[in-house]
């Protein structure tokens, strides 16, 4: 460390005791970094800064009907809870399947919106904005409808499909009317401003025959009918697409952009059709993903320059196709580091270097499944009663909470040593008193095995990964403040990784209640080392961070001393049944919107007692927590408080009584 940097590691006893209590002891990775590669970097906070729009706050799943399941509703509760509104958009498939109709093609169409409303009510109640695909088949047999998962979402044999020819004038008029009536209904139910905040998108991946069995002319006609139907309901509703797969480019993508640019609107006869955003699906490792997206951008710039500033969307930005195939890397921190690297490269290459108006980068990982599926949570579900379940956060969900804590401006990093492709640093700032630096190590390893699953890592793969550890020395110079507080959150194999705790308990398919509780104690991000106070007269700070393979670190630095932290508002409660048949109380509250937040604490008093006890475990930075109790004992009250990195402990919220 430089002589002119006075770095005082002053540990607050109160905070030390707090952190030791909140995160159970785990096997430390700090001592294993001696053989890691050394990387040196520097961030100068006096340099120019880029806008850092949080474009990754989205997820997807299929079909929309799963929103009527209890486990999916709890998932939405968790999505709502991510601090700083860290997950905002949801993109479910087959929403039109949920609309009952009679009299298609006549002037007297009758609609049954019941199932659609039940599903969308769950999203809106949890502050989720929709990417609403105009996808599916209007259903004349709602009484036979079943809640199914993706592979059965298109069970066309159950439907009386009126729409089978998008070159037929009467069918196109009928489709336009249906889209208009749908939009009018949504506006009446949820309000104009809410629906205007959504993205209406074309049907999913029309370049694949399974999703769109017609030609490009039919798709252009369908596009015009959707566009005009939405306009008739409200000209300010957003509409775009085409959401094509396999890198985006191809006959269908090229055709619809040409149609929107210079083609003839089927209904108005005007040249060109509105295109409010452009969407593609690119499923690759982050560098390959960005390379393919850049090819799309270059194509637009060369062939349709009028669209180059349109918002750009990749709303299926996953490593691989197939959400339910087992892959070992989906269970732990590698998947989290994938998300971090994807955000990093999109910002640096597409936004900063190529001036792309990047709007949404969405991982299609909102499904319900196992550790090794493309999901946010590992779900343990009773095979005889799907309403008895327990969800455990995976690191790929927790990393969304860490990313949401970053600032709204980013800076470049200069490296004086070879960095390698696996390391990335995202330095950000908000105002003049808050810095957030996210660091990741995503090891380079093969993830695609010719479509075959890979549920367990091999010894050879372990050796490849273990060689990719990094010791990072990062200089932060010309800070906007001379002193402050610093906290370091961590996800790696031994921190914030509940899968390893599940393995330690034997990997049970049917864990006991105590085993589930123990696993959940490790699902929150760990405070990796004691909170640090520092002083630097020349406004410089040196960081030394050991990054084992498959890890994500978030370092928050506050330069503005606070004397108090906001009081949490009164929480709300929702009842679920756990995997083992006990009662799960989902406790939710509003984010206090404090950049210096360290963690929330939840306290519970049974029955009419005033003997409150802390029941939350881990460093809880989101705004929801599930507390499990045996059914016959669920009576009492909850209250919540916030604690910040300065050591301020907030007032307890007003109490909420269990009243089920």
Image: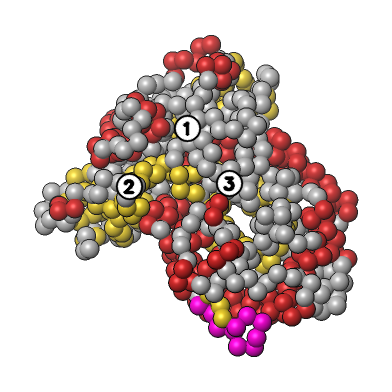
Tag 2 secondary structure:
strand
Of residues 196 and 582, the one nearer the viewer is: 582
Which label lies toward us, 2 or 1?
Answer: 2
Of residues 501 and 537, the one nearer the viewer is: 501
Characterize the local packing of mark 2: few (<14), some (14-19) or many (20 or more) Cα atoms within 10 angstroms: some
Q: Where is residue 202 in the image (x, y as percent from the top left)?
A: 68, 62
Q: What secondary structure is the magenta-colored segment mainly?
A: loop
Tag 3 secondary structure:
loop
- Which residue in the structure is indicated by mark 3? 363
- Which residue in the structure is indicated by mark 2? 382
Characterize the local packing of mark 1: few (<14), some (14-19) or many (20 or more) Cα atoms within 10 angstroms: many
Mark linked to residue 546:
none
In magenta, the rendered stretch is 103-112
Residue 454 seen: yes
- For marks 3 and 2, give the CA distance: 27 Å
- For marks 1 and 3, give the CA distance: 16 Å
Image point (88%, 66%), residue name: 262
Q: Position of residue 281 (x, y in %)?
A: 68, 48
Mark 2 or mark 3, which is nearer the start of the sequence? 3
- For marks 2 and 1, give the CA distance: 24 Å
């Amino acid at each position: 460390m430089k002589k002119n940097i006075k770095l005082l590691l002053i540990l607050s006893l109160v905070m030390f005791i707090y952190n030791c209590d909140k995160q159970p002891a785990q096997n430390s990775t700090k001592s294993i970094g001696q053989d890691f590669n050394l990387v040196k970097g520097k961030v100068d906070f006096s340099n120019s800064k880029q806008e850092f729009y949080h474009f990754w706050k989205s997820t997807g799943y299929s079909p929309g009907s799963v929103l009527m399941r209890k486990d999916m509703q709890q998932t939405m509760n968790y999505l709502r809870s991510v601090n700083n509104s860290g997950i905002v958009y949801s993109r479910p498939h087959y929403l039109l399947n949920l609309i009952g109709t009679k009299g298609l093609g006549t002037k007297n169409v009758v609609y049954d919106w019941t199932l659609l409303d039940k599903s969308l009510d769950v999203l809106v109640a949890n502050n989720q904005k929709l990417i609403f695909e105009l996808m599916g088949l209007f259903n004349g047999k709602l009484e036979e409808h079943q809640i199914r998962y993706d592979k059965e979402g298109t069970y066309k044999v159950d439907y009386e499909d009126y729409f089978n020819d998008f070159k037929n004038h009467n069918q196109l008029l009928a489709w336009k009317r249906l889209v208009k009536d749908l939009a009018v209904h949504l506006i009446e139910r949820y309000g104009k401003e809410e629906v205007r905040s959504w993205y209406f998108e074309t049907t999913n991946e029309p370049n694949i025959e399974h999703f769109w069995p017609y030609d490009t002319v039919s798709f252009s006609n369908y596009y015009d009918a959707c566009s005009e139907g939405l306009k008739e309901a409200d000209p300010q509703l957003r509409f775009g697409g085409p959401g094509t797969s396999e890198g985006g480019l191809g006959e269908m993508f090229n055709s619809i952009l040409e149609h929107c640019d210079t083609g003839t609107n089927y209904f108005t006869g005007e040249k060109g059709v509105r295109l409010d955003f452009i969407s593609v699906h690119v499923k690759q490792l982050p560098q390959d993903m960005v390379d393919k997206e850049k090819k799309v951008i270059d194509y637009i710039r060369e062939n349709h320059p009028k669209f180059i500033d349109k918002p750009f969307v990749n709303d299926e930005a996953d490593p691989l196709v197939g959400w339910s195939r087992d892959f070992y890397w989906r269970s732990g921190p590698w998947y989290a580091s994938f998300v971090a690297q994807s955000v990093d490269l999109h910002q640096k290459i597409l936004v900063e270097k190529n001036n792309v108006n990047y709007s949404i980068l969405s991982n299609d990982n909102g499904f319900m499944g196992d550790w090794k599926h493309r999901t946010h949570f590992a779900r343990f579900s009773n095979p005889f009663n799907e309403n008895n379940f327990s969800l455990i956060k995976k690191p790929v969900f927790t990393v969304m909470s860490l990313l949401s804590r970053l600032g709204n401006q980013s800076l470049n990093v200069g490296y004086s040593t070879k960095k390698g492709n696996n390391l990335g640093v995202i330095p950000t700032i908000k105002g003049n008193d808050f810095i957030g630096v996210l660091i990741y190590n995503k090891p380079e390893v093969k993830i695609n095995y010719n479509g075959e699953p890979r549920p367990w890592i091999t010894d050879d793969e372990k050796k490849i990964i273990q060689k990719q550890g990094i010791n990072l020395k990062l200089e932060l110079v010309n800070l906007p403040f001379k002193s402050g507080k610093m906290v370091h959150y961590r996800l790696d194999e031994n921190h914030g990784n509940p899968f390893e705790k599940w393995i330690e308990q034997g990997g049970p398919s049917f864990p006991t209640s105590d085993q589930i509780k123990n696993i959940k104690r490790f699902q929150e991000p760990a405070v990796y080392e004691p909170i640090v106070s520092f002083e630097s007269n020349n406004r410089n700070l040196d960081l030394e961070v050991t990054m084992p393979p498959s890890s994500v670190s978030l370092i928050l630095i506050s330069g503005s001393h606070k004397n108090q932290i906001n009081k949490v508002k009164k929480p709300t409660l929702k009842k679920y049944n756990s995997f083992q048949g006990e009662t799960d109380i989902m406790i939710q509250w509003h984010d206090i919107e404090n950049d210096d937040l360290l963690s929330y604490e939840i306290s519970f008093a049974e029955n009419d007692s005033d003997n409150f006890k802390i029941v939350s475990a881990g460093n809880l930075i989101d705004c929801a927590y599930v507390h499990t109790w045996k059914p016959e004992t669920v009576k009492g009250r909850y209250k919540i408080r916030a604690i910040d990195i300065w050591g301020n402990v907030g007032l307890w919220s007003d109490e909420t009584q269990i009243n089920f």
